[in-house]
Image: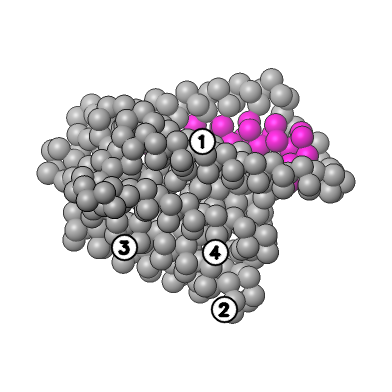
Amino acid sequence: MLLSFLFVLGFVLLIKGAGVLVTGATNIARRFGTSDMVVGLTIVSLGTSMPELIVSVLSSVQGQPELAIGNVFGSNVANLLLILGVSAIICPLPIRKATILNELPFSLIATLLVGFLANATLLHNREELYISRLDGGILLFFFVLFMAYIYHVAKTNKEEVLAHTTEPPVISIGKSVLLILLGVLGLFLGGKWVVDGAVYMAQSLGLSESFIGLTVVAIGTSLPELVTSATAAYRRNIDIAVGNVVGSNIFNLLLILGVSALISPLPFNVMSNSDIVMMIVASTLLILVMPIGRKNTIDRQNGVAFLLVYMGYIAYLVMRG
């Protein structure tokens, strides 16, 4: 009973902690003249990805690797289909050309890289699949490359952003740092309680940790992204809404899986390949809808289609799990 209560309370802390963290971090970024897209791809996406990071790292430390992998894969599918779908229904999302040509393909490449590394042992005629510590290092190397690209973009656009900034930050740096620390504390406690509750649910209901990670935990840890992107779309801040989703997916695959694998190699169930395929399908679907209807825009019809595909994926998981 206590674990069930802490499981629910953990989700509340995850959402509140992510919101507080994003508020503090975004305010600091604003002071240095960073564009909305860069803020979305880095500060906001890292903040909203903290629940996935905490849950996956704690799962790896506590010996629940299927929960760690399921959480990342399920969150990425939810980001692309559920969150972008809801955001597009609230407000059509015009996508920047740079995002179509650079960030979206990078996200797709990261998905393919994880799929290759997870199945690489097949090349050596080994039946056991896993993401090794070496694989984790490779993922982190590509994450550093992505951050170098973001730094280049931020440096290139800094003068233009400062020239168009009219409203000064309303929160002091000291208060922003305090908000960040409180957000991290909330995310840590919330993540631990969610992991403990999810494992308890899996054991008591006879469900696999992978299924719980792909559904309950994945959707729960994606709530900060959902709230952030939906709010940004409502306020017509499209760059934050889209950058948050794309950046979160890249963080999940390269940073979170990389760190989790370095802590402890992650055994990989061959059935999880279907989840990788789903991520590839979702990423490809996102790229393909750009030329349809309003050019380079995810419109409301696309949003409805994304939600229907996501519902079909959840139905598949229920039958599989």
Mark sitting earlier along the chain (3/2): 2
As for residue 34 lying within the magenta part, the answer is yes
Q: Quadrant of the N terminus?
A: top left
Disc 3 residue type?
Tyr
Mark linked to residue 88: 4
Residue 313's disc is 3
Nearer the camera: disc 1 or disc 3:
3
Local secondary structure at mark 1: helix
**SS at mark 2?**
loop
Residues under numbered marks 4 and 2 in contact, where contact means CB atoms less than 8 Å apart = no
Mark-to-mark CA distance, 4 and 2? 14 Å
Q: Which of marks 3 and 1 precedes in the sequence?
A: 1
Mark 2, other Cα within 10 Å: few <14 / some 14–19 / many ≥20: few
- Please indicate whether residue 274 sits to the left or right of residue 245 in the image: left
Q: Which mark is residue 292?
A: 2
Q: Position of residue 112 (x, y in %)?
A: 42, 56
**Disc 4 packing (10 Å; few <14; some 14–19; many ≥20):** many
Q: Which residues are magenta?
A: 6-35
Q: CA gap, disc 1 to disc 3?
A: 26 Å
What residue is disc 1 on?
A: 18
